[in-house]
Amino acid sequence: MMFQIYPTILLLEDGQKYGGWSFSDSLISVGEVVFNTGMTGYQEVMTDPSYAEQIVLFTYPEIGNTGMNHEDNESVGCFLKGIIAKNICMKANNWRSQISLVQYLIEQKIAHIFGVDTRSLAQYLRNKGVMSGCVSSAELDINILYSKLNASLCMQGLDLVRRVTTSKVYKWSFNSSPSFQYCVSQNNQAIFLNVVVIDFGVKFNILNRLSYHGCNVLVVPATIHYKEILQFCPDGILLSNGPGDPSAVSYAIENVKQLINYDIPLFGICMGHQILALAVGATTFKLKFGHRGLNHPVGLYDNEKVDITSQNHGFAVASNTISESLLTVVSFNLNDNTIAGMVHKYKPLFSVQYHPEASPGPCDSDYLFKHFIYVMQSFKIG
């Protein structure tokens, strides 16, 4: 199938501009421009709610080769504001493909630009820091695009969780073929464990990993009151990933502060890690260009073990605000020494600033789900 292409502009808030092409002539979108260094997983990235209000630059030279399918989506839709690519493959070739990336972009009306020197742009963002940008094929007048950029929201102080969280409580049903799961056998020992997942923008594969290990999974809105959560009698609570500034999600921080008092095992992932840290008195800060990719090393400097992890976050926990009397830092991001994992010294709480569920990415840290189950079982028996 042949597709018509149209001139398109990417304009950054500092005036830097890039020309390229789009498969639509009627799209315009403003968001925070960030880059992802993964070689695979464009579908999972595009459907990850953590990318809400962001325009994602893919540094890999070509995306779209394997098309799109229904099984690999990480949410019910696409929450990002646009994508930037060097090249988009027009002829997807994979036995699982159900629609090409080009068709998906057109049907979902996702702003996009290709033909951009993505390596140059990624280096620019590394040096200058991530910033707002506008992708437009509908309007090429720089002055008009500037006016849209000036009206855009700053990511700091922005609560995006309300935009992506579920509006109702629901029970999760395993939605992926077992043949595509990377664990050999199901852990039936967890079959009577009830896990409540607080949805800050949860990825489907977090729910799948819990289900695959035998847990009964109930997903609740981020805005739910902690007393309602307690009524479900959870054996454990998982604080999910999500978009935006964690310090702006005050209602969730207050909920977690209360839940900590009940000695229910808590496991925080990404945004959940930050919310948990804020609930015990730490603070968070915005990274210059964030961590978004599939090969981020985490571990301790005096330990030979290193996990290669999938990461996607623009905020981190400030290490100088961690209370050493309450928390132990158990891993660092070995690229920049930011906190990657922590454990409470007296409560059954732990969290990580990366994605053990992968999807996309390596499965080095999938054992954390088993550890969560072990902690829940220990407290249930106790």
Image: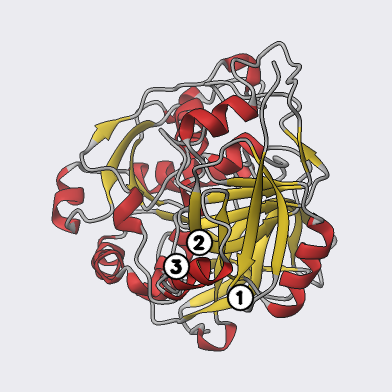
Please tell me whether mark 3 or mark 2 is closer to you in this view.
3
* x, y percent for residue 358: 63, 41
* 3D distance between C-alphas at marks 2 and 1: 17 Å
User: Could you say which is closer to the camera, residue 380 or residue 82?
Assistant: 82
Residue shown at 56%/16% (left/top)? Answer: 177
- Crowding around mark 2 (Cα neighbors within 10 Å: few <14, some 14 to 19, many 20+) is many
Q: In this view, does 19 lie to the left or right of 108?
A: right
Please tell me whether mark 1 or mark 3 is closer to you in this view.
3
Tell me which numbered mark, 2 or 1, is placed earlier along the sequence.
2
**Marks 1 and 3 close (CB-CB < 8 Å):** no
* 3D distance between C-alphas at marks 3 and 2: 10 Å
Q: Is mark 3 on a helix, strand or loop?
A: helix
- Crowding around mark 3 (Cα neighbors within 10 Å: few <14, some 14 to 19, many 20+) is some
Residue under pointer 1: 287
Residue under pointer 3: 148
Residue shown at 57%/55% (left/top)? Answer: 135
Q: In this view, does 269 lie above or below 253?
A: above
- Crowding around mark 1 (Cα neighbors within 10 Å: few <14, some 14 to 19, many 20+) is some
Q: Is residue 135 above or below residue 324?
A: above
Q: In this view, does 348 lie above or below 280?
A: above
Q: Can residue 344 be seen in this view?
A: no
Q: Is residue 222 left or right of residue 317?
A: left
Residue under pointer 2: 31
Residue shown at 29%/64% (left/top)? Answer: 252
* x, y percent for residue 13: 58, 74
The three-letter amino acid code for the residue at tag 3 is Lys
